[in-house]
Image: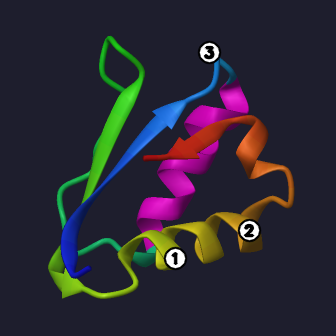
Amino acid sequence: MSMRVVDLQRRGDSPRGEQLLELVQGEFGDSQRVEWNESGHARIAFAAEREDAREAIAARLSALDADWQEHILIL
């Protein structure tokens, strides 16, 4: 399914989760920077729809930290 926005959820309130959210946006920086909201969610918007939006975010997170799934969930 083609999508432009990917929703993320943090797993706990950790500095590493904050870092990963900031770093993952670096590669997909066409959109405005996002932060975790009060419920622990963030939405990363791509400039255009992608068939591989979730996979692209997961690949970038894997390149940043092998244990990223301890900190972030892709919805």
Measured in 3D between alpha carbons, the distance from the residue under mark 3 to the one under mark 2, in whole angstroms, is 20 Å
Residue lying furthest left: 48
The residue type indicated by label 1 comes to Glu
Which residue is the site of mark 1?
Answer: 55
Q: Earlier in the sequence, mark 1 or mark 3?
A: 3
The residue type indicated by label 3 comes to Asp
Residue appearing at x 19%, y 65% in the figure: 31
Which residue is the site of mark 3?
Answer: 13
Q: What element carries label 2?
A: helix
Q: Nearer the viewer, mark 2 or mark 1?
A: 1
Q: Which of marks 3 and 2 is nearer the N terminus?
A: 3
Where residue 37 sits, quadrant-wise, is: top left
Using a 10 Å C-alpha cutoff, classify the residue at mark 3 as few (fewer than 14 neighbours), some (14 to 19) or many (20 or more): few
Q: Give the range drawn in magenta.
A: 15-26
Q: Which mark is residue 62?
A: 2
Image coords of residue 40 (percent x, y):
42, 21
Measured in 3D between alpha carbons, the distance from the residue under mark 2 to the one under mark 1, in whole angstroms, is 10 Å
User: Looking at this view, is 52 or 41 the one in front?
Assistant: 52
Up the image or down, 46 lies above or below 18; here it is: below
Using a 10 Å C-alpha cutoff, classify the residue at mark 2 as few (fewer than 14 neighbours), some (14 to 19) or many (20 or more): some
Q: Residue 35: in sight, yes or no? A: no
Residue appearing at x 57%, y 42% in the figure: 73
